[in-house]
Amino acid sequence: MTFTGTILGFRSHLRSFARDREAVAAVEFAIILPFMLLMYIGSVELGDGLAIDFKVTETARSVTDLTSQYASVDTATMSSILGASSTVVAPYPSSNMVVTVSEVTTNSQGQGTITWSCSLNGTPHTFGQSLTLPTNLQTPSISLIWGEVTYPYQPSIGYVVTGTITMYQSTYFYPRMSNMVTPPTSWTAPVSCSTS
């Protein structure tokens, strides 16, 4: 075969390749596949993150609500209340979740002060620490139970892109059984408390 014949044969193959439409769908699929996978994985990560955010909100409400139902709490009761947080956040891990329950008392101007604070896996607020309450809660001479949950969320696949996302929720409840909740006088790890 001559050089000219080789070039003509090659050109003939190029023309038939250009006219061939059998593999167009496969090529289009190969182009679209990375975007489809990215959207699928992103939606799974987003759904997981929203589910954990909902669990964090439920945990903050649950521990605050449970604490507000007591006139006084002892160490065992506070340990049980804070320990219930792992049940609420299940099936997600709770080992790095910080749960803090505090009582805030307001003065005659509605300025809040920490009366006592207990925390699981974290540091409680300092007794006597000043706190600015939301405007609608700046009522003079009241007590409130303040629950907080901090959850370090690590996306399964998108961790490289986002890193750890810290989710935080807090809520306030009025004590139900009395004007204030008497705190535990002593505590044992992993619960730590700050009282007068």
Image (tube, helix red, strand yellow):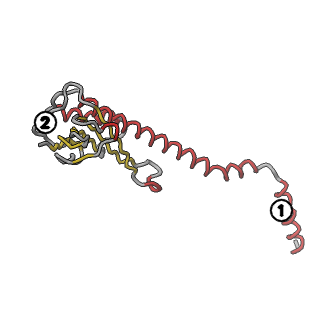
Residue depicted at 20% across the width and 43% down the height: 114
Q: Secondary structure at mark 2?
A: loop
Location of residue 29 in the rendering, given as x and y in whole percent from the top left corner: 68, 48
Location of residue 87 in the rendering, given as x and y in whole percent from the top left corner: 31, 33
Q: Nearer the viewer, mark 1 or mark 2?
A: 2
Q: What's the CA distance linking mark 1 and mark 2? A: 84 Å
For residue 191, which quarter of the picture?
top left
Q: Secondary structure at mark 1?
A: helix
194 sits to left or right of 161 = left
User: First in sequence: mark 1 or mark 2?
Assistant: 1
136 sits to left or right of 36 = left
Q: Which residue is mark 1?
A: 14
Q: Image quadrant for the C terminus? A: top left
> For mark 2, does the 10 Å Cα neighbourhood hold few (<14), some (14 to 19), or many (20 or more) residues?
some
Front-most of residues 44 and 84? 84
The amino acid at mark 1 is Leu
Front-most of residues 192 and 136? 136
Position above or below: 142 against 122: above
112 sits to left or right of 157 = left
Report if the CB atoms under discs 1 and 2 are less than 8 Å apart: no
Q: Which residue is mark 2?
A: 184
Which residue, as the protein is rendered here, is positioned at the far bottom? 3
Residue depicted at 49% across the width and 43% down the height: 46
Front-most of residues 111 and 124? 111
Position above or below: 151 against 184: below
7 sits to left or right of 67 = right
Which residue, as the protein is rendered here, is positioned at the far front? 109
Position above or below: 138 against 22: above
Position above or below: 172 against 22: above
